[in-house]
Amino acid sequence: MTQSNSHPADAAPGVWDALILAAGKGLRSGRAAPKQFEPVAGASLAERAAASLLDSGAVRRAVLVLAPDAALEAEALGIARRPGLLVAAGGAERADSVAAGLEALAEGPPEGVLIHDSARGAVPPAVLARLKAAVRPGLGAVPVLPLADALWSLDGAGQFAEPRPRAGIVRAQTPQAFIYQEILDAYRRRAPGADALDCAAVYKAAGGAVAAVEGSALMRKLTVPEDYAIAEKLYAPAPMEHRTGMGFDVHAFEPGEHVTLCGVRIAHTHRLAGHSDADVGWHALTDAILGALGAGDIGQHFPPSDDRWKGADSRLFLSAAADLARERGARLVHADVTLICEAPKIGPHREAMRAQTAAVLGLEPERVNIKATTTERLGFTGRGEGIAAQAVATVAFPLPGHTAGPTAG
Ligand code: MG
């Protein structure tokens, strides 16, 4: 196999693009639209494929290869408007469509390319990682599954003729992964009659070797109507339950010149006393998240007796609580913080606090609320002796027996 000029021998590719082959007519599926554009549990297979490749950052660009008459349909469905997604017209045969997609990446070419069949929908991140790790110059990679059923050949009357050995036989899936320049060369030089071959076969015919990596049952190719019924279940959002936690915290004022509230440093006549940076808002919110997780309180996770937390940025505590939610398969969906003080004024800093909090939690700002109130000069906050904060956090958990979705693994 010719080695690419642009790629050093033995180096794994760094920059990846993808092809999503969606030029098929899908006639066998028994559906009205080409199967790759038919919604399955709310999104088409082509959309799921594009999202799993682009949103994960697995590839820089993806080319959606469409039948020439399907471009308008994809545009109407909004698939073609996703950032990073290019559209190319395919050809009459599969090999023509692959070749057209590869040529569409020739400007600013990637080092590696993933060639995916849109009828398989989303690609789990673990499979992408295995493929990328396996590819080397002269070596492509294809995800495979073992064969579970017995294999038989049939005679002319449709009756069992001969049992076929199953040992060493696998089912090949997509995406198939290659050094871009090598697979491009293989398609440019492909022999007549290569029309129906898959990419691994074209690559091998050009002298390349292909490694088998573990595939995923989630990349099942949807072909017959029964497959769609299974996919509807596979892609259906997991039923969730919501749990809410609350937090409360107080810190006293001491001589100083600034306070830190919800990650924002604000000049003030005093500072808040505390072992860490005394960010009372984020302490209350950390406790609220831990509460929703049933995970105790901030003092258990970050004891004030531990010198590691002396003067610590409370960002550490809040992000640790958010990490704990992810580790438990839960998703933080909303946070609301109330700061209780006469001074400083919170209003001018509210949006900055919201942005800081959303960034630490990995949430859209719309899912975070920061507000402030006084106690009408009553009590310790009214007398300006300190600041109190309350917080509520809501966390979504998949119900037992469900996972968070087909791309979660
Ligand atoms: Mg505190």
Image (tube, rainbow, N blue to C red):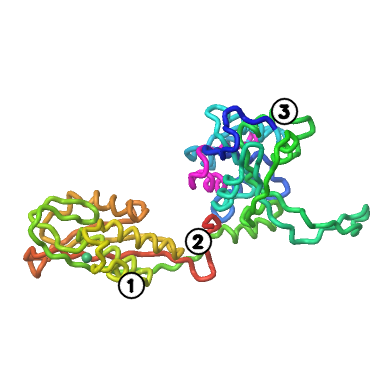
Quadrant of the rendered image containing residue 253: bottom left
The amino acid pointed to by label 3 is Arg
| Marks 3 & 2, CB-CB < 8 Å contact | no
Q: CA distance from mark 3 to mark 2?
A: 44 Å
Residue at disc 2, CB closer than 8 Å to ligand 1: no
Mark 3 or mark 2: which is in front?
A: 3
Q: Secondary structure at mark 2?
A: loop
Give the Cα separation between the discs numbered 1 and 2: 24 Å
Can see residue 100? Answer: no
Q: Which mark is residue 387?
A: none
Q: Horizontal and vertical percent for residue 231?
A: 62, 57
Q: Which residue is mark 1?
A: 296
Q: Which residues are magenta?
A: 47-69
Say left or right for 97 vs 326: right
Q: Amino acid at mark 1?
A: Gly
| Mark sitting earlier along the chain (1/2) | 1
- Which residue is more in the foreground, 320 or 363? 320
Residue pictured at 61% horizontal, 46% vertical: 134
Q: Name the quadrant of the C terminus.
A: bottom right
Q: Give the crowd class for mark 3: few <14, some 14-19, many >=20 residues within 10 Å.
A: few
Between residue 191 and residue 91, name the one nearer to us: 191
User: Position of 89 compared to 61: left or right?
Assistant: right
Q: Is residue 371 left or right of residue 178?
A: left
